[in-house]
Amino acid sequence: MTILRQSANTILVPGKLLPHALGRLEENFSVIRIERSDPDLLSPEAAEKVAGIAAMTVVDARLIDALPNLEIIANFGVGYDAVDAKHAASKGIMVTNTPDVLTDEVADLAVGLLINTVRELSKAEAWLRAGRWAGEGPYPLTKGTLRGRSIGIFGLGRIGMAVARRLEAFGLPISYHNRNKVEACPYTYHPTLLSLAEAVDTLICVAPGGAATEKVIGREVFEALGPNGIFVNVGRGSTVDEEALAQALADGTILSAGLDVFAREPHVPESLLRVDNACLLPHVGSASVHTRQAMGDLMVDNLISWFNDGKALTPVPESVGIARRSA
């Protein structure tokens, strides 16, 4: 069902959106809501009215092409691989995301997930709650520890750097792999992901999704990490060969893994659910009221700035240089 409100500029909201952000949109714009990202749910009249999209779901070329007056796509989240930003740019359409406001929250989660994975905190709590401490004695000593570990970060962007700074305070050496070396960076650079994995025993993925990183973390990388290896992913699930990871956990190729993201969310492979040396979270990296509201505010502020001032606050790289045609 299409819900159409009347105001100066019209924003399309496909699927769900944070109530705080939706409320701000409705205060400033006419809003059209559809159940999912499907142009067939829009009448020709509604499609003509749409000047912007506010979304935390897929925005593909088909939807973009169905909206003849579309000017801007405001993505809820720093990762925007669900948006066809290249196609949008080819049509002069701005795409924005929500960087910085979630950096610290996700970095905190990454460190917490690493500690939980290494020291088995969730399993120890379950031991207590099940009465096993009183009935069987102390929880078994953990094989893992942060002492003596070396950290490798795949994706040293804003979040990766925040993770590195936190772990540096633990007294742990930091190395990283990016497509390009980060200038004036104090950490050791590795030109390939494999050489990074060979040099460390703890790999934290903060890399974006997309074709360039599809399943780049696989069996070879896990073998390089070794039997004391820890793998943590707070980037994108698509970067990992999940079956190879499940097998590496099951056969002891690596010690354990902590995952907040998966390739086909919210569906988690049964092979990962079966292993007991993985800590699995339902993509909660930025999931606090404080941070999600800040993300929603930045998404809406991008739209307001675009229509009021003719410029976006946080354009994605594909959109840099795009100007508002009607400004």
Image (tube, rainbow, N blue to C red):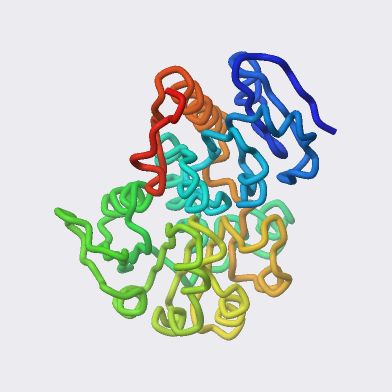
Report the front residue among 292 and 43: 43
Report the front residue among 93 and 304: 93
Q: Residue at x 53, y 46 (%)?
A: 285
Q: Is residue 239 left or right of residue 107?
A: right
Image height of 6 relative to 259, above or below: above
Total tally of numbered discs in the picture: 0
Q: Residue at x 17, y 55 (%)?
A: 183
Image height of 306 relative to 250, above or below: above
The spot of residue 7 in percent (x, y) is 65, 14
Image height of 161 relative to 119, above or below: above
Q: Is residue 123 left or right of residue 5?
A: left
The spot of residue 263 in percent (x, y) is 62, 63
On the rendered image, what quadrant is the N terminus found in? Answer: top right
Image height of 21 relative to 70, above or below: above
On the rendered image, what quadrant is the C terminus found in? Answer: top left
Q: Residue at x 64, y 24 (%)?
A: 10
Report the front residue among 188 and 214: 214
Most distant residue in the left direction = 184
The spot of residue 157 in percent (x, y) is 34, 52
The spot of residue 49 in percent (x, y) is 67, 27
Q: Residue at x 56, y 49 (%)?
A: 83
